[in-house]
Each structure stands twice: as C-alpha cells, then as structure tokens.
Image: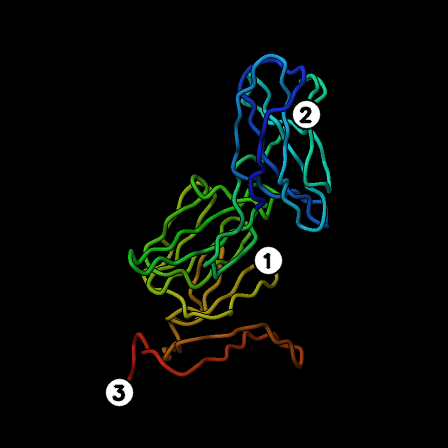
C-alpha cells in the first residue's frame, strides 16, 4: 500500500471546509491497490490544496480527494509526479474510490486457495491455537478487509481446498466445510500437513489422518479397508497408468495409525 501524501494550503478558490486525500497504486497488470491512510486538512475561503510527497513505486499513483462536505473519495489525478495542486470544482473529480481502506494479503498467511471468485488465506496464531482465514473482495484477489472479512477456525489449518459447493478446511484435528456463510464439521479427525489435495472428475481428493478422503459430499474412501500411519507431511496426486487411475501419496514417516494392529 502507498504511504500517505503531505497536504498544505496554497492560494486558490476552493470552498471552505475539510478535504481528505488518499493515494493508490496502479499495478502493471492494471489492478489498483488499496489506499493509503487518509490525511486531512481544513481550508478557508480563498485557499487551494497542495499535495506533496505523493508516493511512487515505479508506475502510476492515483490521488483521490474527498472535497469539503463529502466522505466519498474521487479521482483527482493519476500521475508519476510527486506533487500536485488541486484548485477545481468537485464536479471535475473523477470516479469514486471503491476500495477504500482495503488491505494486502497479510504476512504470515501460509495456506492459500481460490474459491467462488475470492482468494482465501489461512494465518495461524499459536498463542490462541486458532487460525484466521481471510478472504478477499470478489474478483479483487489482492484486496482484503482484515477488520471484517474472515472466519476463525480452532487449531492450525493445514489445508484449504475448493469443491463445487464448499471450501474444505482441514486442521490437524478436524475437517470442515465452509459454504460462504457458515462452517460445518465434516469429520472429527484432521489432515496431514503438506500439498496432497487434487481435483479430478468433479471431486476433490486429499489425505487425512485416517487415509484418503473425497469431497463433496465428504467420504473417507479407505477408513473401512486399511489403517496406516498418516505421516507428518504428505504430497499427493492422481496418476494415470495402464488404463487405471490411482491416487498416489508420498509420506514423510511418522504419526500413528488410528486403528493399529500389533
């Protein structure tokens, strides 16, 4: 996100009142970042707005102004310069800023998945033993509202994987389905850390602490036939060979079988 610019008063003809300014960047692919923190200044009659220290990141910076009596930020200028003066009617302002105060993907998010036009990112907080799953704005995969757009899951999330009807969330001790409104538990056991979820023929397959599972609907495909140590890390994929299709999982040895035979 850009830093905030600096505001000062110069001679001009703007209406008296408080003016607020924020900046955004236009990324090379055309996306717009979230905004800087707003800065404000109060003008009296016969004054105009000087905007300096406009942040630059090697491209275009957009300067948005909320004029006197308004809380809506509108585009004043898109520039590669570090300073500008605004002394025009509010009618000269451009498009509204729709992504005010949005955040970037938080540092510390380690599990990421795309589902239903949003990006989901899981961040574990060890002190609370819970995970926040942040989700982006619709089709704005780089914009997050960390104050409002999240769900909390007990334990550490090791897997986020998309299905047609739900985002499957796997922690070390539970498996859940998130339908966009609520979180429902699918199993009272969890998944092995790693990258083992794979989609094939309309279903998603993944490795749990009790073997191979499919979703949605959720079903454990191996629990009734075999019990093996689930490993402490897993990588899985679909292998097609000799006219057959198999799920192949590679495990880093460890863990305990849920129904071991001695």
Quadrant of the image occupied by residue 86: top right
> Is residue 215 toward the left or the right of residue 130 in the image?
right
Q: Which residue is mark 1?
A: 202
Q: Nearer the viewer, residue 22 or 130?
A: 22
Q: Which residue is mark 2?
A: 86
Q: Nearer the viewer, mark 2 or mark 3?
A: 2
Of the 4 image quadrants, the one containing the C terminus is bottom left
Q: Residue furthest left?
A: 262
- Whole-percent x and y of residue 243? 67, 77
Q: Earlier in the sequence, mark 2 or mark 1?
A: 2
**Spatial CA span between label 1 and label 3:** 38 Å
Q: Earlier in the sequence, mark 1 or mark 3?
A: 1
Q: Nearer the viewer, residue 255 or 15?
A: 15
**Spatial CA span between label 2 and label 1:** 55 Å
> Is residue 145 toward the left or the right of residue 76 in the image?
left
- Residue at 59% x, 48% y is 141
């Amino acid at each position: 996100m850009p830093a905030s610019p600096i505001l000062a008063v110069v001679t001009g003809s703007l209406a008296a009142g408080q003016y607020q300014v924020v900046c955004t960047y236009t990324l090379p692919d055309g996306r717009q970042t979230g905004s800087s923190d707003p800065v404000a200044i109060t003008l009296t009659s016969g004054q105009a707005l000087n905007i300096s220290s406009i942040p630059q990141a090697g491209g275009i910076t957009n300067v948005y102004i909320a004029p006197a009596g308004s809380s809506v930020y509108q585009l004043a200028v898109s520039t590669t310069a570090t300073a500008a003066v605004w002394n025009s009617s509010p009618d000269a302002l451009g498009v509204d800023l729709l992504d005010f105060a949005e955040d970037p993907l938080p540092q510390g998010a380690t599990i990421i998945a795309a589902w239903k036009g949003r990006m989901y990112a899981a961040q574990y907080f060890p002190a609370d033993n819970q995970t926040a799953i942040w989700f982006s704005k619709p089709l704005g995969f780089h914009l997050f509202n960390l104050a409002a757009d999240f769900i909390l899951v007990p334990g550490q999330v090791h897997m986020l994987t998309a299905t047609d009807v739900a985002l499957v969330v796997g922690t070390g001790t539970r498996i859940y389905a998130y339908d966009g409104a609520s979180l429902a538990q699918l199993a009272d056991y969890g998944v092995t850390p790693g990258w083992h979820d794979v989609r094939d023929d309309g279903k998603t397959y993944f490795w749990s602490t009790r073997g191979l599972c499919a979703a949605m609907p959720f079903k454990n495909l191996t629990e009734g036939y075999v019990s093996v140590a689930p490993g402490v890390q897993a990588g899985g994929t679909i292998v097609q060979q000799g006219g057959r299709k198999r799920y192949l999982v590679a495990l880093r040895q460890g863990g305990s079988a849920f129904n071991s035979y001695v």
